Image (cartoon, rainbow, N blue to C red):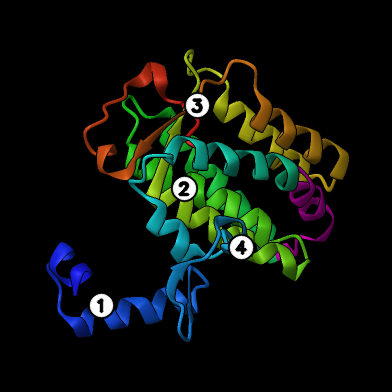
């Protein structure tokens, strides 16, 4: 088969790949027609595994920009809901996570791996604290995006930890309006310049104290 030769794989491997892609709604097989790629409009972009597969594609910047647009539409409301519905246990966990975030940001040199991990957990905790099960998948998707794509920002490196603090304090105070606005400000910050990096560049990208509050998300 042509595809087997092109990718250097066995027929068994190809069959398994087609089966998986079909189950994900990316391929469609019809009798007497064959197998074809499903129109992109029908792909489930909320599937974490599909997001993983998007890593390295030519249109990564566009894909990540679209995801940021989705966050801007959804995350402020998630913060507002978390301010209302977060349990005592969830507030404690969010507090511990923010304290860890502050310590990482205050270090003489920013540990990018630690920052990315704590930043990911901070935002995921918010989705988990909304009290709305339909928000839970977005926390999983956000985690996948953190793992596979990095966005860093803040040319001045001076506001990101403060933006997270405003979100955190509003949620802890149980103020949904302030939490919503703080999240919107964080995602729309005018001094933020987003540049997406493939995860393979993470370890090679060095950042110092002046970038200690660079916003990855």
Give me the C-alpha separation between circle 1 and circle 2: 38 Å
Q: Residue at x 83, y 36 (%)?
A: 178
Give me the C-alpha separation between circle 3 and circle 2: 19 Å
Give me the C-alpha separation between circle 4 and circle 2: 33 Å
Could you tell me residue 25's position as x and y percent?
53, 72
SS at mark 2? Answer: helix
Q: Quadrant of residue 198?
A: top left
Q: Residue at x 46, y 26 (%)?
A: 214
Could you tell me residue 199's position as x and y percent?
32, 44
Could you tell me residue 151's position as x and y percent?
45, 35
Give me the C-alpha separation between circle 3 and circle 4: 28 Å
Residue linked to disc 2: 118
The magenta stretch spans residue 173: no
SS at mark 1? Answer: helix
Which tag is nearer the camera, tag 3 or tag 4?
A: 4
Which tag is nearer the camera, tag 1 or tag 2?
A: 1
Q: Which residues are magenta?
A: 76-88
Tell me which numbered mark, 1 or 2, is placed earlier along the sequence.
1
């Amino acid at each position: 088969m042509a595809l087997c030769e092109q990718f250097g794989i066995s027929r068994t491997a190809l069959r398994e790949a087609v089966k998986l892609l079909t189950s994900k709604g990316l391929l469609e097989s019809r009798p007497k027609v064959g197998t074809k790629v499903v129109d992109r409009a029908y792909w489930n972009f909320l599937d974490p595994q599909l997001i993983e597969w998007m890593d390295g594609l030519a249109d990564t910047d566009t894909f990540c920009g679209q995801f940021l647009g989705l966050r801007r539409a959804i995350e402020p409301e998630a913060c507002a809901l978390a301010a209302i519905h977060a349990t005592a246990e969830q507030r404690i966990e969010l507090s511990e996570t923010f304290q860890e975030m502050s310590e990482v940001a205050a270090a003489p040199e920013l540990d990018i791996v630690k920052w990315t991990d704590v930043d990911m957990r901070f935002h995921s905790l918010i989705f988990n604290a909304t009290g709305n099960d339909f928000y839970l998948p977005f926390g999983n998707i956000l985690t996948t995006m953190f793992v596979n794509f990095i966005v860093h920002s803040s040319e001045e490196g001076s506001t990101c930890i403060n933006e997270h603090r405003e979100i955190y304090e509003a949620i802890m105070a149980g103020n949904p309006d302030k939490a919503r606005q703080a999240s919107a400000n964080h995602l729309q910050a005018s001094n933020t310049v987003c540049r997406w990096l493939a995860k393979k560049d993470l370890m090679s990208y060095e950042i110092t104290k002046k970038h200690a509050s660079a916003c990855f998300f």
